[in-house]
Each structure stands twice: as C-alpha cells, then as structure tokens.
Amino acid sequence: MSNHSLTEPTIAKHEAVRGDTVSRPAEEMRHRASPALTALPAAFAALLVVLATWQNGAFAVRHWAPPALFVLVVLAVVNGTGVVATRSRPVKVALAALWGLAGWIALSALWSESPAGAWEQANRAVLYAALVSLALTAVLGRREGRLVAGVLVGGVVVVAFVTLARLLAGDDSLFVAGRLDGPVGYRNATALLFAFSFWPLVSGAAARGVRPSLRAGCVGSATLALGLALLTQSRGVLIGLALGAVVAIGAGPDRVRRAWTALLALAPVAAAYPLLMRPYHSWDGGHGAVHAGDITTAAIALSCGVAVVGLAGFLAALLDNGLRANGPSMRRARLWARGGLAVVAIAAVAGGLVAMGNPSTFAHDKWDEFRTLDDTLGPTRLTAAGGQRYDLWRIAWNDFESAPVRGTGAGSYASSYYRERATDRNLDNPHSLLFSLLAETGLVGTLLFAVFLGALVVAGAVAWREAPEGARRLAGGIAAGGAVVLGQSFVDWTWLIPGVTGLGFFALGLGVSLLAPDTSPRTAPGMRVRVARAACLTVAALGVLSLFLSDFEVRKADADRSPAARLDAARAAGRLNPLSLDARWLQASALEEQGDRPAARDKLRSALDLEPRNFVTLALLGDFEVRGGHRRAALAYYRRAWRLNPRDVGLRKLAHGNFAS
C-alpha cells in the first residue's frame, strides 16, 4: 500500500493501536487546561522582565540573573515533560544560532583581554536565548500567545501611566540634564522601553471589530508612549521606531489603518511639542535647572493629548466598526485614506527638503558634525549628529580589522578604547550591537546573529502564508515592538541592559510563535535530544547561578567592615567565579589590612596575570607600593597604567611622580 492511500481514519487507528504515550497526553493536557494556565510560565517570565526595568533596566547581575534562572528552569521542565510546540526547521536554525552565539561569546574568554567580561556577556546572551526559546517552545497556541503578549505590552503601559503620574506630581528625580531618565535610569533605555509598546498599541488600535473602548485605550496609550519617549530626547529611538514601522506597516495587515492610527497618536505629541520640551529647554545645556513646574506643565499637556486622542480613537472605532467590510462606503473610505496618506507623505518629503536645503550640503554638514565628537546642543537633540559614536565605532572597527574572524574576545573593547580614545569620556563598549559583535566576536559571532535573525524572518514568512488575519494582526504588532528594540540596539548600548533588550527578544520569538496554528501537534523529542538539551540547560543555569552568587559575595565583601569577614566573602566569590577581578582586588585589600602584605601583593599580581592590560589593577599595585614606601616600584606600575590609559589626568600625574610619599 502506498503512503497516499493512508486516510485520516487509518492513521488514527494506527496511532490508537500503537498507543502514543507521549504526544497524546501532551495534547490532551493542552485541551483540558485553560490558556491562562498553560501560558502561566511564559506570562510570568514576561512579567519578570517588565518588572526588571524598574531596577535600572536590570543592568546589574543581581537583577537579571533571577529572571534568567527562572526561564532556564521553565525550559528544563518543558523539555523534560515533552509538552512543547512543534518547531519548523527555520525556527530550529534560529535557536541554534542564538545559543551558538552565547557559546561563542563564552569561548572567547580564552583569548579576551577581559575573561570576566566575556563570561558575564555570555551569561547575558544566555538570558536572551532562553527568552526566545521560551516564546517559541512554551507558548503552545495563539490563545496563550495573546495572553503573554498582553502581559508584555500591558506591563509597559502600566509603567508608562505610573511614570505619567509621577510627572504630574512634578517628580524631578526622573530627569537628568533636562531629559527623562526614569524609570530605567538611562535616558536612551527609558525611551526604548516606552517606544517598544508603540507599534503593538497602534496595531491593536487599528484592528477592526475590536471593542471601541479597547481601541481607544490602545491609541491613547500609544500617544503616551510616544510623548514619554520624546521627553528623553533620545535620537536612537527614532531608528528603532522606523524599523518597527517597516514591520508593522510594511508587513501588515491593516496597513492603511495602522498608518493613520500612528499619525493620530503622533498628532497631540506634535501639537504639544513646545510644552513637552519645557524641561529640556529650562535646563538649557547646563545653564539652568529643571523645575517641578516645568515637569508638571509637560505632564498636563501630555495627559490632555492622551485624553483627546483616546476620545477621537473611540469615535473613529465606532465609525470603522460600523462600516461593512465590502460595502461601497468602505471602498470609498479606503480610497480616501490611501489618497490622504499619499498627500501626507508628499508634504512630509517636501517639508523635509525645504528644511534641509541642498541635500548634498546637508549630508556633508551632518557628517562633519558627526565627527566632531562633541554633543551639539540646541533646541532639540533629535536633529543633532554630534557625540561620541564616531570615536567609539572607529576603535571598534580597528579591533575588527585586527582579528576579523574570531574577534578580540568579548569584553576586550574597553582595553582598546582607553588606549586609543580621542576624548576623556570613560566608556567600556562601542554603543552599538553591530560594532560590538564585529569587534569582539568577529565574523563568526556576527554571522551567527545574522543567521538567527534571518532564520526567524524565514520562519515568520513561511507561517504567515497559512496564518489567519487575526494571528497576522497580533504577530505583526508584537514583532514590530521587537524590531524597535533591535533597531535602537544598533546605535546604542541597550544590548547590555537586559530589562529592555529582553522585552525585544521575547517579542521577536513571540511574533513567530503567534503565527503557528493551534491545531499543530505537540511533540516530544527523542531521548538523546532531550538529554542533550537538559545537559545544555543545566550548564547554562549553573553558569548564571555561579555568576549571581559570586556577585552576591562581592557585594557582601564590599560592605563588610571586618577584614576577616571581607576576606572570607571575597574568597567565596573567587571560588564561584575564578575570573572575577573584583574578588581578587577585595582579597588583596583585606589581606593588606590584616598585615599580610606579601599575600596581598601576590593576589594583585594574580589579577594582573589574568588581565595583563588592565590599567586599574596596575594602578592598584602602584597604590600598594606607595603605601609600602616603594616609590620606584610604584612609579613603574603607574607608568604602565598610564600607557594603557593616556588620557586619564590622575594617572598622568602619578606617572610623573606626583604622589604622596
């Protein structure tokens, strides 16, 4: 009998006879359980990532390691039970590439100038890979996906309204240099947090058939997100929003409605622009101060805009929902809407050309401004091109050229930067995911990341053809949020802020997962595959746990006043993470305080052996020799440190012998 003669009843009978003890219980469990129950692990992980943004974007290990451990444990349980979503070959390739990148970053510790930095970056990459894996394997259907997406975007909306309430109260602690800095604690990351929700909210507001109240809430929240992003004066977020527009509007559906909804959300922000800019203008490049009254004025203007656009969105939704999808009135409305968009686009291009003048001259002037290395302050930062990026990217490119295949090793950039920098800014990364990958992981790491993105796009495109319009609508919106995060990461260091970057990676995986059909079978991989995955997840979890516990001991040692207690905690930190320089520095400090100077010197020298080009360790050795009265030895260490960081004024003085005896 040929395979073509096997009918569905025959297949069902065959499966009943052999007793499918793996896939059948998984399928039955899924149908019995409610979406809220089956989506609970992924939804809780999404909530943890959103909450982490309150802790400086979860920049510190102690804030991002717990969510990472939770996700890894959930993945281990899912892998062990075999209740996983069916994955296409492109999805498997995407996951393999992203996990491969994490492994490559860890491997680069072998040749990195900062093995400790490489180890921390590898574990952070494990978090991103785990979040994508969770979205693609533990979200079992579209109903579950909708709940998880609601937690992800809704959580950011709650943060936005809490921030607005604080602004209405005139909370000036949210501002730094006239720009909105909180709640993340870094202005560009704060902009990215709110911008992440913009396109998913616009997509929800543009969907026909949805309750008018929900559509109104979405468009009002989109206005709030855009207004808060504007208050940060972040330039990188414009690139993120543009890439998000390519996904949300370019992929669709509801392209015309999404475009008009985005313009509706933008309108009150543009109208209230002078009032929203009051905090920035009152700061006046450091000559003034941000007053509570300016903050409240901006918050009231934004609140009014949210209310007005929400009401307008409600009325528009009533009208839109009442139109027949294929009626003459709908066809005329579509024609007028498309024509209106064409007029707006032409007007925008014409206005831009008038504002810039000669495009060639404008581009040349902006390039010169980009290379000035100074922040070009003015009425707004959004059109300024000056800053540190040229210098940062120049050094990163030099590193790439020095080791194009394998890279200089994760964490190595700081050493190159301090040797070659053209300014006195103390930074340790190239402020770009692309340049970071090229410089530190070379073509291998860059291609792994490119394969991850490419395979994810292919997986989404293949599933898109078979997905119903409702699934496309939600998937396109949430994927656009991930694209916003990805876009800004190419011109900023948000890659190192897991709170906001985790949102983006989760959204990218969720966008593909939402397109998978609910009726697809749930499969349990073979025993060898499951054992291999369990081993990898265990190794990853142990790596994150050791880093977390080592960080805890370092902070404990740093806080203890007793030299003996400090030494015990620092030694524990060193055992948990042998690559930690902080643990060795703290041990040396405690040993010296106890009077054991030879042991303290040996510990500092072991730190120097681990990272021979670390100017901080060299400076600490110089300080140590000064306290011991060995001026010549101290001078030799200071001069070595100064050569590695020639723009540091303090090191220059010490290298010339200007230190106390």
Image (cartoon, helix red, strand yellow):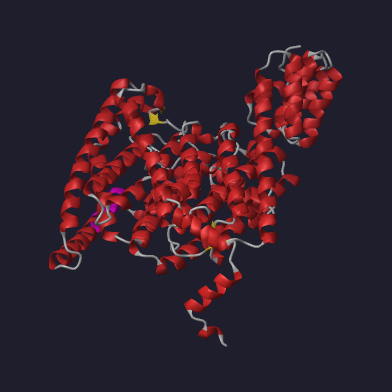
Which quadrant is home to the N terminus?
bottom right
Quadrant of the image for the C terminus?
top right
Residue 586's spot in the image, x, y percent? 73, 23
**Where residue 239 sits: x, y (%)?**
42, 49
Task: Identify the residue at the far bottom of this view.
Answer: 1
- Range of residues picked out in magenta: 346-356
Q: Please report the residue visible at 44 percent of the width from the left and 34 percent of the height from the top.
A: 187
Q: Is residue 285 left or right of residue 417?
A: left
Query: Residue visible at 29% across and 53% down?
Result: 353
Is 356 left or right of 633, judged from the image as shown?
left
Inspect this view and state whether residue 620 appears.
no
Q: How many numbered dots are placed on residues in this image?
A: 0
221 with respect to 497 (left or right): left
Q: Is residue 346 visible?
A: yes
User: Residue 105: within the magenta?
Assistant: no
**SS assignment for the magenta stretch, majority:** helix
Return the x and y of residue 503 as percentages of the image width and height: 47, 45
Q: Residue at (47%, 33%) from the top-left corner? A: 186
Q: Is residue 355 magenta?
A: yes
* Residue 178 occupies quadrant: top left
Q: Position of residue 556 (x, y in %)?
A: 66, 22
List the single residue furthest toward the front. Answer: 17
Spot the residue most to the left: 329
Q: Is residue 654 left or right of residue 375?
A: right
In the displayed structure, 18 sits above or below 430; it is below
Q: Nearer the viewer, residue 560 or 467?
A: 467
Q: Residue at x 28, y 50 (%)?
A: 205
